[in-house]
């Protein structure tokens, strides 16, 4: 996505796939204006150099002005992305937060419920995958991760 990514983007993904109906909690913090996040990825692929990479995926991001959900996808064989949901509220740098994402199915809808620091918002999108990988990513600078908890 940019020539700075190798120095400002680090990700870890769990090797097993998960299914709808779980809660993901990650304790994390960030330096000023940085972006630690949870990744939900339908598939993993390889780039032209043979390194693993996310394909279509969703990112649930914390930063000093709240939380965003980004949908990443490939268009014309190029990485593309769009902001699909957000909630604005103040978060402080160098402060530990627990970001929780509940990935639910209600009747015919797939829903992401995002909870952090007493704030909550939801995102409904039936294109969310039924089976997926879960990861964490630190990007755009210094991010800290303390633990991850996944529950059915």
Image (spheres, rainbow, N blue to C red):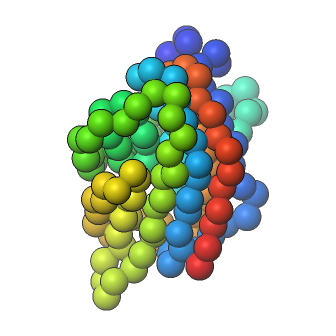
Q: Is residue 40 visible?
A: yes
Residue depicted at x 72% and y 26%: 49
Nearer to the camera, 30 or 137: 30
Task: Indicate left or right for 95 with 7 as reference.
Answer: left
Q: Position of residue 138 (x, y in %)?
A: 58, 32
**Would you identify the image quadrant in which residue 25 lies?**
bottom right
Q: Position of residue 129 (x, y in %)?
A: 47, 66
Task: Indicate left or right for 18 with 64 as reference.
Answer: right
**Would you identify the image quadrant in which residue 120 lies?**
bottom left
Looking at the image, is 56 positioned above or below residue 124?
Answer: above
The count of marks equals 0
Outermost residue, left direction? 88
Residue depicted at x 54% and y 40%: 96
**Would you identify the image quadrant in which residue 112 lies?**
bottom left
Looking at the image, is 47 positioned above or below residue 148?
Answer: above
Q: Which quadrant is home to the C terminus?
A: bottom right
Q: Is residue 1 visible?
A: no
Outermost residue, top direction? 3
Nearer to the camera, 71 or 106: 106
Q: Position of residue 128 (x, y in %)?
A: 41, 64
Residue depicted at x 68% and y 51%: 147
Task: Indicate left or right for 35 with 17 as reference.
Answer: left
Nearer to the camera, 82 or 51: 82
Residue depicted at x 51% and y 51%: 98
Outermost residue, bottom direction? 107
Q: Position of residue 111 (x, y in %)?
A: 35, 69
């Amino acid at each position: 996505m940019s020539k700075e990514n190798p120095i400002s983007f680090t990700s870890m993904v769990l090797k097993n796939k998960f299914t709808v109906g779980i809660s993901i909690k990650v304790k994390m913090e960030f330096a000023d204006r940085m972006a630690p996040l949870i990744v939900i990825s339908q598939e993993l692929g390889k780039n032209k150099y043979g390194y693993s990479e996310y394909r279509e995926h969703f990112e649930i991001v914390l930063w000093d002005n709240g939380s965003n959900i980004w949908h990443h996808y490939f268009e014309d064989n190029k990485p593309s992305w769009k902001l699909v949901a957000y909630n604005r509220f103040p978060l402080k740098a160098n402060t530990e937060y627990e970001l929780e994402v509940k990935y639910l199915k209600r009747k015919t809808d797939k829903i992401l419920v995002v909870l952090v620091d007493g704030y909550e918002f939801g995102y409904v999108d039936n294109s969310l995958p039924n089976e997926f990988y879960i990861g964490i990513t630190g990007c755009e600078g210094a991010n800290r991760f303390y633990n991850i908890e996944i529950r059915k």
